[in-house]
Image (spheres, rainbow, N blue to C red):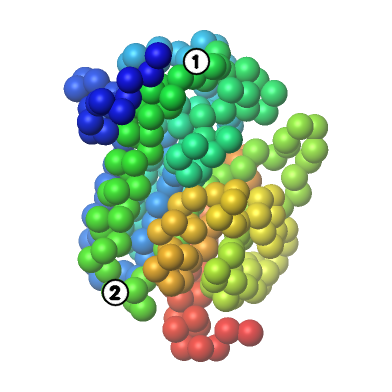
Amino acid sequence: MDDMNNVPADKMTCLTPNDKPPFKFYPAEKESPFFLVSDHAGRMVPAALGNMGLSAAEWERHIAYDIGIREVGEQLREKLGCVLIEQVYSRLVIDCNRAAGHLTSIPPVSDEIIIPANADLSATAKQEREEGVLHPYHREIERHLEARDIDGTIFVSLHSFTPEMKGQKRPWDIGLLHDHDSVSAHILRRLLEQEGTLCIGDNEPYILNAQNEYTVPYHAAKRGLAALEIEIRQDLIQSEEGQREWAERLARLLPLMWKERKGGIAR
């Protein structure tokens, strides 16, 4: 029987003292409106969970992490000189873009692959992952946002998506996801269209809302922060060349988007 009510929350953790902290923080190097987060950048696993019953090949797949987005995010942060906070543990341990208790927070199956370590978890085991990984990551984001000027900040969540899901090809090169702030996404979309041949998704391949996702609604919407979520197709950023190309493109266009947004020129 679970006895979690008698255990302090800060002791309910899946991490040991030898495990890495659940996030990596890159401080701003200059004044910048951009606040970058990357929920699925890493694929580490707490020592207690081993390989979670998966093969080495499965840990290379998109089910474990957002392929290529860590490299894009770190290069983008370097070019913009802004804050970046990365999640370092695999989304299979716990998905940090889902609220605690969400049906897909700790998936027993991902893209038709059974995750043995996630089967029939007790309430205690789930809370250990929430307290060890999910909540510390989001508390770190909260801590840094609290010191920010709301009007002078745009919250940018970085992700990548698999080119094919359940047999369906996904044609978009990049998807711009938005909910409470459609203005930022629409300006960036127009700027990306000027690049020429890009296929750009508007709330594709996913829809951003508080039911489906957590990070942007929880941190940005409740504060009234300008925000958008960027999804880049993974085959475009698997190589160093592709990672560099997309980091350079976003480092060039995001400041233009922000300047236009603050100038009230959006259309």
The quadrant where residue 237 appears:
top right
Q: Nearer the viewer, residue 140 or 76?
A: 140
Q: Secondary structure at mark 1?
A: helix
Judged by depth in the image, the label closer to the viewer, 1 or 2, is 1
Position above or below: 230 against 265: above
The reply to whether residue 245 is in sight is: no
| Residue 45 shown left or right of residue 227 in the figure | left
Where in the figure is residue 134, as x and y percent of width and height? Answer: 38, 38
Residue that badge 1 annotates: 117
The residue at the point 61 percent across, 60 percent down is 176
Q: Secondary structure at mark 2?
A: loop
Q: Position of residue 26 (x, y in %)?
A: 27, 50
One can see residue 192 in this view: yes
Q: Nearer the viewer, residue 2 or 149?
A: 2
Residue located beneath label 2 in the image: 149
Residue at 45% of width from left, 60% of height from top? Answer: 156
**Residue 11: percent from left, percent from top:** 23, 27
**Tag 2: Cα neighbours inside 10 Å, few (<14), some, or many (≥20)?**
few
Q: Quadrant of the C terminus?
A: bottom right
**Residue beneath the point at 57% across and 76% down:** 183
In the figure, is residue 109 to the left or right of 54?
Answer: right
Name the kind of residue labelled 1 in the image. Ala
Outermost residue, right direction?
A: 168
